[in-house]
Image (cartoon, rainbow, N blue to C red):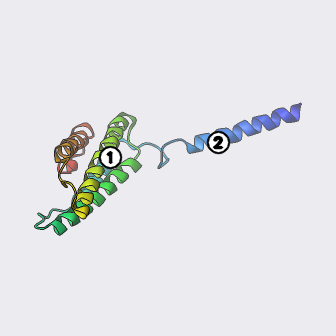
Amino acid sequence: MKRGRQTTVMALLVVGVIVLGGCGGSSGGKRLTKAEFKARVNALCEDHDKNKSHDSPQSEKELLAVIVRDREAYARFFAGLKKLRPPLTAQPTVDRIARLSKVVLKYHDDGRKALETHKGDPFENAARYDTTISEIVRLLYSKLGATSCNGI
């Protein structure tokens, strides 16, 4: 009986170590401080600004290239943001941005598809896209204090 109890205790300890080791989000480790998080988000925004297109497309082919480039820049930005471990107080805002990111990426995907197939309007959901981007900027700038994100 004593040996069975020891085995049970050991099994529970092993399970506990595995469970605790798996906690803490995708990047593991401790959460960032507010200042660390703000600095990293600002760096993500600066990188995003360097990678997105600043061109005014003159043709359908150029527009397609802009859509593809901007989609990749946004996808990188949102993936980078998702990897960060924000302070607990910032987590709901980051989660909200993650939900809104789907609208941004879908807009780029729909625009690309419309241009490639010549079916539909590549700007069909521009109003929703603009509203979503404005909300993301507001959250980044006002809620998270990421001042480099004003022009995302």
Position above or below: 115 against 23: below
Quarter of the image where the N terminus is located = top right
- Select label 2 or label 1 by which is in front: 1
> What is the x, y in percent for residue 99?
34, 41
Q: Is residue 26 left or right of residue 95?
A: right
> What is the x, y in percent for residue 7?
81, 38
> What is the x, y in percent for residue 77?
31, 54
Which label was assigned to residue 102? 1
Residue 102 visible within the image = yes
Q: Residues within 10 Å of mark 1 (few under 14, many from 20)?
A: few
Disc 2 marks which amino acid? Val
Q: Secondary structure at mark 2?
A: helix
Residue shown at the point (21%, 64%) measured from the top left: 64
Residue shown at the point (16%, 44%) measured from the top left: 127
Task: Give whichever of 125, 80 is nearer the camera.
Answer: 125
Task: Give whichever of 99, 147 is nearer the camera.
Answer: 99
**Which of disc 1 and disc 2 is earlier in sequence?**
2
Please state the total of marks drawn on the protein image. 2
Q: Is residue 5 left or right of residue 79?
A: right
Disc 1 marks which amino acid? Lys
Q: Are marks 2 and 1 in contact (CB under 8 Å)?
A: no
> What is the x, y in percent for residue 3?
87, 36
Which label was assigned to residue 111? none
Q: Marks 2 and 1, how far apart in space? A: 35 Å
Q: Secondary structure at mark 1?
A: helix
Picture quadrant of residue 100: top left
Residue 47 visible within the image = no
Task: Give whichever of 38, 105 is nearer the camera.
Answer: 105
Picture quadrant of residue 114: bottom left
Q: Residues within 10 Å of mark 2 (few under 14, many from 20)?
A: few
Position above or below: 1 against 42: above
**Residue assigned mark 2:** 17
